[in-house]
Image: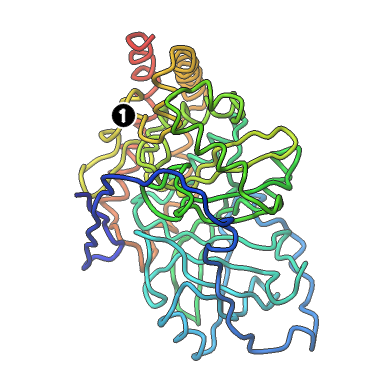
């Protein structure tokens, strides 16, 4: 039994472990059977008028707190109360600019209702295809409810990107919804067209996401299609068969090996346990058609640095042993293969050096100086000021001690 802590002071949600998973089966292409977002009727006809050009700024540059405002009609506000998963029309405002968008609530264990502090998908071009806001057609607003500091995503994604691994860009926002202060949010880049074009030579491949916890690459019934540019799911079926073969040699030609090793080692190095390799959670798979190889992508990085709030009072305590990051079938096969295991250990040592030079402790202090007042004044956050201060100190301790911990582990794991 494991516990999902709802980000509401009065609610705990329980979920059960999945003890067995079905084997891969022949079936119709999953593109046809998986759910898609339900787009509600628009309040206005987008053909009646073109929205004004978006602000002449970029959403993720420079890093700052954007003052964003979302306005919903009472009908659409109530629609999100009834079914937060379905898009409704809204107005997005920034400064003197206002334009039409569609939004819906996102998240699983971090889910909050519209009158609490929900994470949101903001789709800018649903109503007007090709329309952009600050250079983006879609972005996420994350409530960061599990994170007392509200900086974990910023730290984790930045570290991944600076090591050359595909990871989302991020910024911060102060959100007002229907005139109410909804507090401090992170703005997170989706793994969509612009992201794929930046990180892959061929961005026209298939993208999948685990639609539920404990969903491995061979269980197609729980894989959700995000993009299916190839029009079929043959490649992921082949990966699933290889993952069940018991031989990493079957997997090796199907993955971008250098990125695969880096992905496994990055998750272990920063103790990103809510992940593919430790908890079979929060990952996507991208297939690059020209190379016929897969890359794992990490998402939802608010539970990093050994922080598991419903079990441990401080960060740097949970899932700290890199040798335990073997839950996903691909990670398990790597750990059992001498060559892959050796490369994993070497990558962990490399990221120990990177973490040391990255100086995360100083970065935490800088974030506190820049944004601490915004976090403390958030009227809807789950944690209080003492929790925030304690977590800031804990994060500094993590970054100062983690390189030595990783080197000590590597010395015994070779």
| Quarter that holds the C terminus | top left
Q: Residues within 10 Å of mark 1 (few under 14, many from 20)?
A: many
Of the pair 87 and 184, the residue shown nearer to us: 87
Figure disc tally: 1
Q: Residue furthest front?
A: 26
Left or right: 386, with 25 as reference point: left
- Color theme of the render: rainbow
Residue at 61 percent of width and 49 percent of height: 233
Report the residue at 34% width, 53% height from top. Answer: 146
Front-most of residues 207 and 353 = 207
Between residues 299 and 32, which one lies in front from this camera angle?
A: 32
Residue under the image location 46 percent in, 31 percent down:
330
Would residue 37 appear left or right of 79 to someone viewing this image? right
Coordinates of residue 15 in the picture (x, y in percent): 25, 57
Residue in the image at 35% along x and 41% along y:
279
Quarter of the view holding residue 78: bottom left
Mark 1 — residue?
A: 320
Image: 195 above or below 131: above
Looking at the picture, how far across and down is residue 14, in whole percent? 22, 59
**Foreground pick, 409 / 255:** 255
Check the image and report above or below for 257 versus 275.
above
- Picture coordinates of residue 374, whole percent (x, y): 45, 59
User: Where's residue 71, x and y in %?
Assistant: 56, 81
Q: Is residue 7 above or below residue 177?
A: above
Q: Quadrant of residue 165?
A: top right
Q: Secondary structure at mark 1?
A: loop
């Amino acid at each position: 039994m494991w516990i999902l802590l709802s980000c509401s002071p009065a609610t705990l949600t329980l979920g059960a472990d999945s003890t067995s998973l079905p084997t891969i089966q022949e079936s119709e292409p999953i593109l046809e059977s998986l759910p898609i977002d339900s787009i509600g009727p628009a309040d206005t006809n987008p053909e009646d008028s073109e929205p004004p050009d978006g602000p002449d700024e970029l959403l993720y540059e420079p890093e700052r707190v954007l003052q964003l405002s979302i306005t919903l009609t009472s009908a659409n506000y109530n629609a999100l109360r009834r079914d937060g998963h379905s898009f409704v029309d809204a107005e997005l405002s920034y400064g003197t600019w206002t334009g039409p968008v569609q939004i819906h609530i996102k998240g699983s264990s971090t889910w909050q209702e519209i009158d609490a502090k929900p994470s949101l998908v903001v789709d800018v071009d649903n109503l007007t295809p090709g329309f952009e806001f600050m250079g983006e057609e879609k972005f996420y607003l994350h409530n960061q409810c599990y994170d007392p500091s509200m900086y974990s995503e910023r730290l984790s994604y930045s570290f991944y990107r600076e090591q050359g691994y595909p990871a989302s860009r991020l910024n911060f926002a102060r959100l007002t919804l229907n005139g109410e202060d909804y507090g401090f949010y992170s703005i997170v880049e989706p793994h969509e067209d612009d992201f794929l074009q930046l990180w892959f030579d061929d961005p026209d491949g298939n993208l999948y996401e685990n639609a539920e916890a404990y969903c491995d690459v061979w269980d197609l019934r729980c894989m959700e299609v995000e993009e299916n540019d190839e029009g079929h799911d043959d490649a992921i079926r082949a990966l699933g068969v290889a993952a069940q073969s018991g031989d990493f040699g079957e997997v090796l030609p199907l993955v971008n090996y250098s990125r695969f090793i880096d992905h496994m080692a990055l998750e272990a190095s920063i103790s990103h346990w809510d992940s593919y390799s430790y908890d079979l959670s929060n990952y996507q798979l991208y297939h690059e058609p020209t190379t016929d190889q897969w890359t794992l992508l990490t998402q939802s990085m608010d539970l990093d640095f050994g922080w598991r709030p419903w079990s441990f009072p401080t960060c740097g305590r949970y899932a700290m042993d890199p040798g335990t990051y073997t839950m996903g079938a691909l990670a398990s096969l790597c750990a059992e293969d001498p060559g892959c295991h050796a490369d994993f250990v070497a990558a962990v040592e490399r990221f120990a050096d990177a973490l040391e030079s990255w100086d995360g402790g100083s970065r935490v202090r800088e974030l506190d100086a820049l944004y601490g007042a915004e976090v403390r004044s958030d009227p809807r956050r789950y944690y209080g000021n003492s929790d925030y201060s304690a977590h800031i100190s804990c994060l500094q301790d993590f970054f100062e001690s983690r390189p030595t911990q990783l080197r000590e582990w590597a010395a015994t794991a070779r």
